Image (spheres, rainbow, N blue to C red):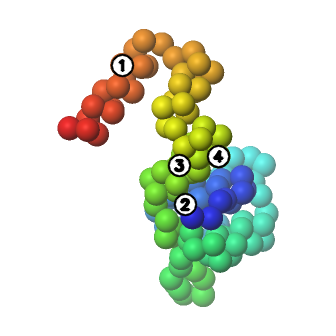
Amino acid sequence: MKTLTTAEEDIMQHLWDLKEANVAQIIDKMPEPKPAYNTVSTIIRILENKDFVNYRKEGRGHIYFPSVSKNDYSQATASKLASNYFKGSFKSMVSFFMQQEDLSVKELEEILNEINKKNS
């Protein structure tokens, strides 16, 4: 799966939340200072070329929607992170974040509960 730039990922986060939207609706959800319409439109076209976004015609405009789920992108990104920085070891990656973030016992229990749910 292709990697997204920060700007592309920002647009995708809004589109994942909205499920589908035109450019103006995406801009409405963005914080101030809002980017120019042409900027967002250009990024959407880049996302189309990367096969992250698709569209349907509606009137004279387009309604855009994700063609890659947030979960699929998250999983691919986490796998790439583990592969590139932790020799493919999710255990090493989780250990790194535990040390960096100084997780509490309660947070560790919540993580273990999620893992146990997945394995059940």
Residue drawn at (48%, 32%) of the image: 91
Could you say where residue 87 lies in the image, as x and y percent from the top left? Answer: 59, 41
Cα–Cα span, label 3 and label 1 = 23 Å
Tag 2 near tag 4, CB within 8 Å: no
Amino acid residing under circle 3: Ser
In the image, which disc is placed on residue 79? 3
120 horizontally vs 107: left or right: left
Select label 1 or label 4 by which is in front: 4
How far is the residue under mark 1 from the one under mark 4? 28 Å
Can I make out residue 25 in this image? no
Q: Return the x and y of residue 26 as percentages of the image width and height.
A: 61, 61
Q: Quarter of the image for the C terminus: give it.
A: top left
* Mark 3 secondary-structure assignment: helix
Circle on res. 38: none
Determine which residue is flagged by label 4.
84
Circle nearer the viewer, 3 or 1: 3
| First in sequence: mark 1 vs mark 2 | 2
Q: Which residue is mark 1?
A: 109
